[in-house]
Image: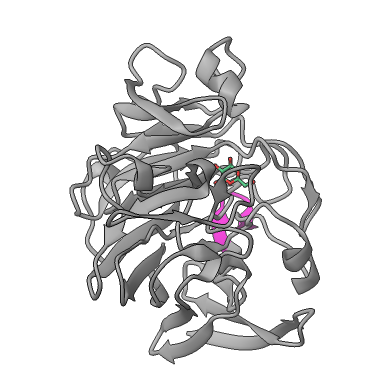
Amino acid sequence: MIETRKFGVTKNGAEVLCFTLKNEKIAVEILNYGGVIRALYTPGKQGLCDVVLGYDTLAEYEENDGYLGAVIGRVANRIRDGKMTVDGKEYQLAQNDRTRTLHGGKEGFDRKIWSYALEDDTLILRYFSPHMEENFPGNLMAEARYSLNDNALVLEYTACADAKTPINLTNHSYFNLGGEGSGTVLNHRLRLLSDRYTAIDGDMLPVSLEPVEGTPFDFRQGKRIGEDIDADFPQLRLGHGYDHNYCLDSQDKVSLFASVYCPETGILLDAYTDLPGVQFYSGNFLDQNGKRSHYGKRSGFCLETQFYPDSVNHPEFPSPFFNDGEVYESTTIYRFSVSSGFAEDSRKEIKD
Ligand code: GAL
């Protein structure tokens, strides 16, 4: 079931709607401003919890950065010096993060009004990004589909352009499985099924692939997010905590890559994707007022499924470039349940 209500009016006078997707297990609120996931209600041991960070008003979405719950595009994550070369031609993209391009540039997909359509129980948002928007070549049409499948939120993206261009879409939800505004996520347990991550330099750009083995980056067996976050380890200092891309082995199949468990509420999140990477970001820069309370540092974590950061400049990474007419497609699923820990059977691949 999908309910539609007015959410607000932008500074430029555009009306924004809020769509609530609901079934007997979970309810999710989505805005056609930035494709934002504004709220996600799922049962915990003591009742329903809203497990994503967000704001009560549209003005706060327009004023704040932090990308709470938004779709990121055309290219998620950082691009060195905002430069890329496509078929021998250099492009100077919009630089919005000192010299870098971050999350699509000065006005990324997270700040756009998307058109919408409802198809049965699926919400479809569409955004047309014109040639040279933020200096990316090619007219591009992007589509984000939101649906519920039992206790899971299914996010499906497609995009296609009329010239070769990079496409790297993600959703930037911050989760707090103790309920948004309930404090930090340091006591959540994370299991991240990844052997390698992209180590960064002082500009938070990838320089090498490193094994997680024997480092604070090893979450393969599951441990508290806060367990090693303040360890004296150079990569943690450079990221101000965890803010790194982990390499995934999904091989284009929608596969489980992470589980996160909150002992206080018993809420377990299992996350699946067919993409080759995920940015695990421990909310190190959070500092804003949100729905229930102030969101401080580490009061939410993100699992942003993606092509690797700066992959436009790293031919050795999986390529984010799509040719004229070639279709970008990806699926990411966040599944919620109440549990007493990680469910062993959640390791198996799921198909929606
Ligand atoms: C994350 C990124 C962080 C920070 C954040 C927005 O995706 O990894 O470094 O820029 O977005 O505040």
Image point 42% across, 60% down: which residue?
Answer: 169
Tell me which secondary structure the magenta stretch mostly adopts. strand
Q: Where on the image, by quarter, is ligand 1?
A: top right
| Residue 247 highlighted magenta (yes or no) | no
Return the x and y of residue 135 as percentages of the image width and height. Answer: 50, 64
Visible residue check, residue 338: no
Range covered by the magenta-colored residues = 41-50
Please say whether residue 47 is one of the residues in the magenta stretch: yes
Q: Nearer the viewer, residue 316 or 270?
A: 316
Residue located 61% across and 30% down the image: 186
Front residue of this view, candidates 95 and 54: 95
In the image, residue 344 above or below residue 238: below
Indicate whether 345 appears above or below 210: below
Q: Position of residue 89 (x, y in %)?
A: 35, 56
Image color mode:
one colour
For the view shown, which residue lies furthest in the front direction?
A: 89
Quadrant location, the C terminus: bottom left
Q: Quadrant of residue 262?
A: top right
Indicate left or right for 181 with 336 as reference. right
Left or right relative to 345: residue 85: right
Image location of residue 34, percent across then percent down? 58, 70
Q: Nearer the viewer, residue 64 or 323?
A: 323
Q: What residue is rendered at 27% in x and 63% in y? A: 322
- Number of numbered markers: 0
Q: Residue 41: image x %, image y %?
A: 58, 63
Q: Is residue 322 visible?
A: yes
Q: Is residue 325 above or below residue 244?
A: below
Q: Residue drawn 35% across and 48% down? A: 307
